[in-house]
Image (cartoon, rainbow, N blue to C red):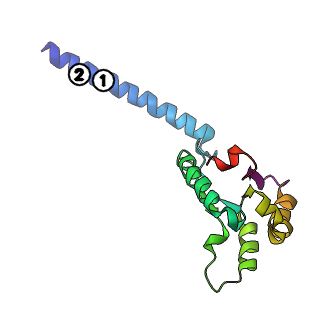
């Protein structure tokens, strides 16, 4: 008998709390119902693309560096990072136009700076010039990696 009475009180207690919760919900909805809410962890809908500039003589170094960056990319759960280099140009495509198009489409640039890169007229006049010209923009950053100048460059 006592259990039935207590059970009835519990039901009444929860019912009362539910009514208060619904009233509070209605008041809150009336106050801020039309306010647009943004998620706390904003995820970029598109991948963040970066352009990789390197001398072909440094292709093995580029592959080792980008291999290590894959691990770093995996630690960024709210971002999708995608790299592009001239190795992705398909045979028969106009490589100069493809490189220009991809530089414009990328959000940032990664340069593997080496004597071979600095000796390349195309890289210095086209790629490096474009990256430097566009680096002040908020959406375009350039990062350099010195390859072959020190033990840091050859320790990858």
Where are the magenta residues, as a range?
Answer: 136-146
Taking depth in this image into account, of 68 and 119 the one nearest to the observer is 119
Q: Specify whether 74 is left or right of 152.
A: left
Which residue is drawn at the image coordinates 66% and 84% (left, top)?
A: 93
Q: Residue furthest left?
A: 1
Q: Residue furthest top?
A: 2
Q: Residue at x 51, y 31 (%)?
A: 24
Q: Specify whether 154 is left or right of 77.
A: right
Q: Secondary structure at mark 2?
A: helix
Answer left or right for 87 relative to 19: right
- Asked if marks 2 and 1 touch (Cβ < 8 Å), the reply is yes
- Inspect this view and state whether residue 72 appears: yes
As for residue 83 lying within the magenta part, the answer is no
In the rendered image, the vertical position of residue 127 relative to residue 90, given as above or below: above
Q: Which residue is mark 1?
A: 12
The residue carrying pointer 2 sits among few (fewer than 14), some (14 to 19) or many (20 or more) residues within 10 Å by Cα, namely few
Which residue is disc 2 drawn over?
A: 8
Give the percent coordinates (x, y) of residue 43: 59, 50
Q: Quadrant of the N terminus?
A: top left
**Above or below — where is 21 with respect to 82?**
above
Relative to 63, say whether 154 is above or below.
Answer: above
- In reply to whether residue 138 is colored magenta, the answer given is yes
Q: What count of labels does the image hold?
A: 2
Against 93, residue 65 (above or below) is above
């Amino acid at each position: 008998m006592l259990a039935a009475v207590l059970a009835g009180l519990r039901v009444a207690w929860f019912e009362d709390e539910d009514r208060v919760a619904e009233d509070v919900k209605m008041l809150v909805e009336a106050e801020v119902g039309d306010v647009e809410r943004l998620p706390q962890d904003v995820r970029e809908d598109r991948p963040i693309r970066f352009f990789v500039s390197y001398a072909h003589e440094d292709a093995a170094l580029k592959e080792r560096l980008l291999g290590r960056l894959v691990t770093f990319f995996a630690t960024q759960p709210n971002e999708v990072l995608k790299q592009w280099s001239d190795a992705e140009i398909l045979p028969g495509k106009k490589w100069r136009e493809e490189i220009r198009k991809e530089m414009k489409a990328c959000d940032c640039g990664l340069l593997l700076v080496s004597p071979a890169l600095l000796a390349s007229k195309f890289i210095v006049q086209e790629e490096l010039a474009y990256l430097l010209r566009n680096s002040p923009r908020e959406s375009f950053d350039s990062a350099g990696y010195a390859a072959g100048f020190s033990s840091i460059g050859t320790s990858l």
